[in-house]
Image (tube, rainbow, N blue to C red):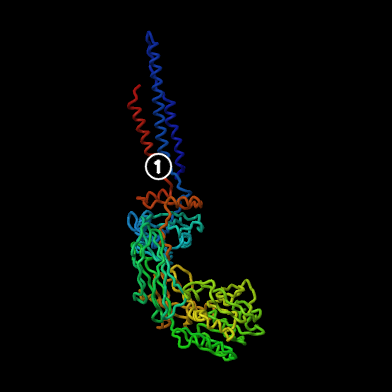
């Protein structure tokens, strides 16, 4: 127990007054003489003992009454922590968690509304002159200005839900750093009103400030059922016109009840493209397949949605992509052989692929950027300029397919492979070797064969290049010889892909050209070429938005399709000949956005809310108390959000548990005891 005014305890010296009165009682007794006084002596002795006991009890009651009054005026209290409230100026910052999870219903209504009411109650408990600050999930810079009580109440009433869900450590750091310099000398207090969702409450990363007292108000929601769309992905990369698409949708059931016949809808450019019904058990997840066909080229804005209540922010998932017209492929050929004839025969009059070819000694390097896939066909000469441009072509996202020619020296090939981080060629082996293995799991072959055969009849290659074993070079084998070496391999470089055959495309390997494996191998190399597209982003992610084409301008604008709101933005260089969109802040609303250069739409961006808010796992008051104790956060304390009279709670928080009332009651009690002893104790 401590005292707010300990100097009042000097008044305990007044306890000597009842003692002095008792010791110096000068009352005189008259002596009477009797003939037989033995009986009277015994009566006198008994009466004197009772009188002395009565006087002692009266003295004790008076002393206790005086002591209780003195202690009451000294303002005794039980400290709640190590806090003492001595500052004349106070700065109070209140964080209100306005994330989507706070829209859940509790015993007294929506949690966000409860938090706003509690924030106003906290403000009303402070005296006039207190400076208040508001902090919400959007970390608005305007909230770093101090407010008076009326301004604070007005702004709290205007708080709405926010898609952001920052980590607890970031909230605390923002709260501490957000206190302006004008109140640095004030006593600083931070209140955190939240549901304390487990996936964002990271006490391990909190760096405490010993000058700031922090009080946690946890709000608990009742059990809420939630069915959500977790993620979406395509079966194969690359979106082509006329392509049959398989879109997979992962559905999660975060509740204890099963769902039956829930419709899942896919709309593209506001037209319904696919619908499916799902059945999902309690606390399970399911992957649903949606099938449709890309019938038009250009930007495709997709929305997958289901119906669920009361949590609705995760009922939709947005993604978008661009379908191009014909893919363009270029063959750079050796004019001394006819290897390019096989590719020309494959792609002639094809609806999806337009094929051009050019001799190796007449390549217009500036035109290579107009193609998505380039074939090097049995080349004998690869100039340094062509090598440099091919490296840039792959780095930008193009696909390069190499059929090495039969040569005595592969120095020019090795220079190209070195620039592409590929393996070099050690020599050429003239023996025949059969292909024995197909990588059925790779995109080139995943949907080509109805069944996978380990002993398939595969072509025999007559003469192949032997590549040097370089362990540090990552590659994926697509076709293998019987000796375990790669007949066809691929590796990534920059944003593109390099496919490397171990043999030339010529008459000697006609077995490969006429085999069924030739067409899907080469054709899919073209179809899966081109720049990779990012289908969806998160409103809380930090992924760079890279434009698929150079806009030719450094100032662009982004338009929200749903609201038609527009904001200007700029770009900067990203890698080789690519531009990154610079967004001062990420879009706050989920949905589709269009990037526009003047009035021309050059790309789409789709944003989704993060799904971590969907997980209904929260810390209770007891859990938070244990965490605080385990981390030894001496300036942290948990307060029950159901506390009715916060003014008394605030007094207890500032000055500890006040005990003076109990000592006043004790003083009155002891005075009544004295009166009762005097009145009813008869000698």
Q: Mark 1: give few (<14), some (14-19) or many (20+) Cα within 10 Å.
A: many
Residue 223 versus residue 251 in the image, above or below: above
Nearest the eye: 8 or 202: 202
In the structure shown, which secondary structural element does the residue marked by tag 1 occupy?
helix
Camera sees residue 530: no
Along the line of sight, the residue nearer the viewer: 504 or 602:
504
Task: Decide if residue 7 is on the left or right side of residue 365.
Answer: left
Across and down, in percent, residue 58 comes to 39, 28
Q: Quadrant of the C terminus?
A: top left
Residue at 49% over, 52% down: 633
Residue indicated by mark 1? 660
With respect to residue 552, does 62 lie above or below? above
Looking at the image, can residue 554 be seen? yes
Q: Using the image, determine if residue 191 lies above or below residue 580.
A: above
* In the foreground, 430 or 339: 430
The image shows residue 467 at horizontal and vertical percentages of 63, 77
Q: Position of residue 307 (x, y in %)?
A: 33, 66
Which x, y percent locates residue 155? 36, 63
- Residue 319 occupies quadrant: bottom left
Q: Nearer the viewer, residue 554 or 55?
A: 554
Residue at 38% x, 80% y is: 295
Q: How many numbered badges does the structure rendering display?
A: 1
């Amino acid at each position: 127990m401590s005292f707010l005014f300990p100097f009042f305890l000097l008044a305990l010296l007044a306890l000597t007054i009842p003692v002095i009165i008792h010791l110096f009682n000068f009352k005189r007794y008259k002596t009477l003489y009797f003939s037989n006084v033995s009986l009277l002596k015994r009566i006198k002795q008994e009466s004197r003992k009772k009188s002395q006991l009565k006087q002692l009890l009266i003295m004790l009651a008076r002393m206790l009454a005086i002591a209780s009054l003195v202690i009451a005026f000294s303002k005794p209290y039980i400290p709640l922590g190590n806090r003492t409230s001595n500052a004349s100026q106070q700065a109070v910052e209140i964080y209100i968690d306005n994330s989507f999870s706070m829209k859940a219903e509790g015993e007294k209504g929506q949690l966000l509304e409860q938090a706003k009411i509690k924030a106003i109650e906290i403000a009303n408990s402070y005296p006039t002159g207190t400076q208040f600050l508001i902090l919400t999930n959007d970390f608005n810079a305007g909230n770093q200005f101090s407010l008076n009580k009326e301004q604070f109440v007005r702004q709290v009433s205007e708080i709405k839900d926010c898609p952001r869900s920052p980590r607890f450590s970031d909230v605390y750091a923002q709260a501490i750093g957000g206190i302006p310099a004008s109140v640095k000398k004030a006593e600083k207090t931070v209140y955190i009103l939240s549901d304390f969702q487990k996936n964002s409450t990271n006490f391990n990363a909190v760096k405490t400030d010993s000058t700031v007292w922090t009080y946690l108000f946890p709000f608990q929601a009742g059990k809420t059922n939630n069915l959500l769309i977790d993620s979406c992905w395509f079966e194969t990369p690359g979106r082509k016109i006329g392509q049959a698409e398989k879109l997979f949708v992962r559905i999660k059931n975060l509740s204890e009840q099963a769902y039956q016949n829930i419709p899942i809808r896919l709309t593209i450019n506001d037209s319904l493209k696919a619908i499916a019904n799902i059945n999902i058990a309690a606390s399970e997840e399911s992957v649903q397949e949606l099938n449709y066909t890309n019938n038009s080229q250009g930007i495709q804005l997709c929305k997958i949605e289901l119906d669920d209540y009361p949590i609705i922010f995760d009922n939709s998932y947005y993604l978008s992509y661009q379908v191009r017209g014909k893919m363009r492929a270029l063959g750079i050929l050796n004019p001394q052989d006819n290897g390019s004839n096989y590719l020309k025969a494959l792609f002639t009059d094809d609806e999806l692929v337009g094929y051009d070819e050019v001799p190796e000694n007449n390549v217009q390097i500036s035109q290579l950027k107009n193609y998505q896939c380039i074939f090097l066909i049995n080349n004998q000469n690869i100039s340094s300029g062509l090598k440099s441009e091919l490296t840039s072509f792959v780095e930008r996202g193009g696909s390069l397919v190499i059929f090495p020619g039969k040569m005595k020296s592969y120095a020019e090939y090795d220079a190209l492979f070195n620039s592409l981080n590929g393996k070099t060629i050690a020599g050429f082996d003239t023996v025949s070797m059969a292909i024995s293995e197909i990588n059925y799991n790779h995109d080139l072959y995943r949907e080509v064969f109805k069944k996978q055969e380990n002993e398939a009849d595969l072509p025999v290659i007559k003469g192949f290049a032997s590549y040097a074993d370089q362990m540090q070079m990552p590659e994926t084998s697509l076709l293998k010889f019987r000796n375990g070496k790669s007949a066809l391999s691929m590796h990534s470089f920059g944003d593109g892909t390099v496919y490397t055959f171990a043999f030339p495309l010529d008459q000697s390997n006609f077995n490969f050209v006429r085999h069924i494996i030739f067409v899907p191998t080469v054709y899919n190399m073209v179809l899966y070429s081109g720049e990779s597209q990012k289908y969806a982003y998160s409103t809380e992610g930090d992924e760079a938005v890279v434009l698929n084409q150079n806009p030719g301008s450094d100032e662009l604008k982004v338009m929200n399709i749903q609201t038609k709101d527009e904001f200007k933005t700029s770009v900067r260089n990203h890698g080789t000949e690519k531009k990154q969109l610079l967004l001062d802040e990420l879009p706050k609303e989920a949905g589709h956005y269009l990037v526009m250069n003047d009035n021309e739409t050059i790309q789409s961006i789709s944003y989704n809310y993060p799904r971590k808010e969907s997980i209904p796992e929260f810390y209770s008051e007891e859990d938070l108390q244990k965490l605080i104790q385990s981390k030894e956060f001496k300036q942290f304390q948990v307060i029950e959000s159901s506390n009715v009279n916060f003014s008394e709670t605030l007094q207890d928080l500032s000055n500890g548990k006040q005990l003076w009332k109990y000592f006043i009651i004790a003083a009155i009690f002891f005075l009544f005891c004295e009166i009762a002893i005097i009145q009813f104790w008869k000698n």
